[in-house]
Amino acid sequence: MKLITLAALLFSTLCFAEVKPLRFGVGLFQPDKDKNDQTYRAFSDYLARELKRPVEMRTVDTWEGLAKSLANGETDIALLGPWGYVLAHNESGAQVIATILYDGKPEYFALMITYPDSKVEKPADLKGKTFAFGDKGSTSGYLIPFYYFQKNFGVKEPEEFFSKVIYTKHQAIETQVTRKELDGGADYNRNRDTMVEQGLIKASDSKIIWKSEPLPNDAFAVSAELYKDKKFVSSLQKALTNAVEELKKNPELFPKHYTGFVVKDNSFYKIIRDAGLATGKLTPKK
């Protein structure tokens, strides 16, 4: 009996090893790549077990870069920001199959912040000031605030409105604004709340001067080629929605406040697509 069990285990291991690994790209949700890899390793291992297929995970340090990776075939499945997903969908037909839940909700908010004793009370007051956006693949850090300035002030490029513009990581935006190195910056509620919770900044060290309407959370997407395999997509969606049960057994499966996934399709990201089209940052493929 032991020999049979051992043989079955070896056979299963060999079969697992012969299956082509899934290349899983993850956006830079944490302050650095090492921390990001460490944070999402348990989730990557969970997917491998559920799908009975090796999963090779790697962090891609910009949303734009991850979108391109998914589009050019370097990545099979990805957890990426909403704007990054819309870019990947537009470029190559990548398809969202689920949206992450944060404290049980599939949506979040973009913000604009300044320091407490600043005379800036609303976005209009930022004209001629210094401002930081996230990278150009960021939804809350770039696309949505840029769309706001374009829609309300006719701004074609940010440099027309501000005296100085930089593009950097969300964590850096918060710290530079609280230190008064910048007059304002774009961020999102989840990042700001987490930094306050971790003691990296104090909520009292900055003030929110603008908040967007609800935006769809990060997308779990698959390449256009994989999306054709409906059996695989169904299995992957099942693994994602079942992750809430795994989380009860393994609290390290997700970062704090991430509570699972809900099945969503491309239509859920229409608000992001509309902003991309309106700003001219998204050109539909013919």
Image (cartoon, grey):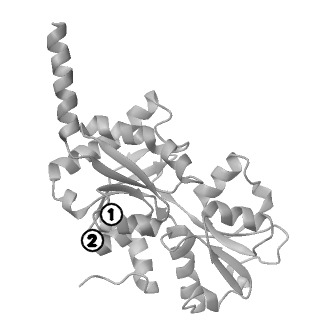
Q: Mark 2 highlights which residue? A: 92
Residue 49 in the figure: left or right of residue 212: left
- CB atoms of marks 1 and 2 within 8 Å: yes
Direction top: furthest residue:
1
Label 1 vs 2, first from the N-terminus: 1
Q: What residue type is labelled 1?
A: Leu
Residue 125 in the figure: left or right of residue 16: right
Q: Which of 3 and 90 is in front in this view?
A: 3
Q: Is residue 60 above or below residue 14?
A: below
Q: Position of residue 229 (x, y in %)?
A: 15, 54
Q: Where is residue 106 in the image (x, y as percent from the top left)?
A: 45, 54
Q: Where is residue 65 in the image (x, y as percent from the top left)?
A: 43, 67
Q: Is mark 1 on a helix, strand or loop?
A: helix
Marks 1 and 2 sit apart, C-alpha to C-alpha, by: 8 Å
Q: Is mark 2 on a helix, strand or loop?
A: helix
Tally of numbered discs: 2
Q: What residue type is labelled 2?
A: Ser
Question: What's the mark number on residue 70?
Answer: 1
Quadrant housing the N terminus: top left
One can see residue 207 in this view: no
